[in-house]
Image: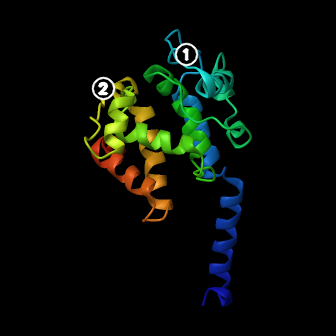
Amino acid sequence: MVENNPVNLQILREREEAASAAPFLSKRFEDMLASAFPEAYPADELFIKNTFTGEDEKDYSRFFELFNGKKWNEVNLDVLNKIYIQHSRLTAAGSIYYLPAFLKYFFDLKNTRSEFFIYLMFDLENGFDEHTSDELTQSLDGKSKLKREYSSFEKINPIQSKLVATFLVNVSNLLPEDCYESAQAQRALTNYWGNFLLF
């Protein structure tokens, strides 16, 4: 038995020491994101145009304030727990630039109740291209399926794509099987991202 065998006890002690000395998986994932994704603020248009009024305009302003002028590694997504922001206002280019911020924030699965986790999973399954409100409404009503547009994913290099796939494996394996996002992660892996696990 392990508890009576000094050799086994020594092996277990060594494993515990090695495990405590190694960085947590989420920290290692964060470090890999930092080395794989460029930090420089891009010249592309990152936000959809503000054509909103009323409450939607206020929502846009809160979202814009959270992201505008900040590099992906400077955005504090913990703010989403304090202020309500209903929708993402990022263009496809903005979604790609800020992708590592969302991957980092949601990797440990502690913040999956945020609407932005739902938006991230939707984008990783369907593509970053902007769907019209009519397309989204028809999809929600079951009248039509959203077209999956993966061309935006081609702007993400293989190393970055492997990190996205790792994130999706984490979601698929650690969320309960009956959780919609777990199935969504599996579909996203099957349809596109899983290819990058092979390299």
- Classify residue 40 by image quadrant: top right
Of the 4 image quadrants, the one containing the C terminus is top left
Q: How many marks?
A: 2
In this rendering, which labeled residue sits more in front, label 2 or label 1?
A: 1
User: Is 5 situated left or right of 47 in this image?
Assistant: right
At x 50%, y 22%, the residue is 94
User: Is 47 situated left or right of 92 in this image?
Assistant: right
Taking the view exactly as shown, the residue that stands out farthest to the right is 82
Q: Is residue 10 visible?
A: yes
At x 45%, y 40%, the residue is 164
At x 53%, y 25%, the residue is 89
What is the x, y in percent for residue 152?
A: 35, 25
Q: Is residue 7 above or below residue 52?
A: below
Taking the view exactly as shown, the residue that stands out farthest to the front is 54
Element type at marker 2? helix
Disc 2 target residue: 151
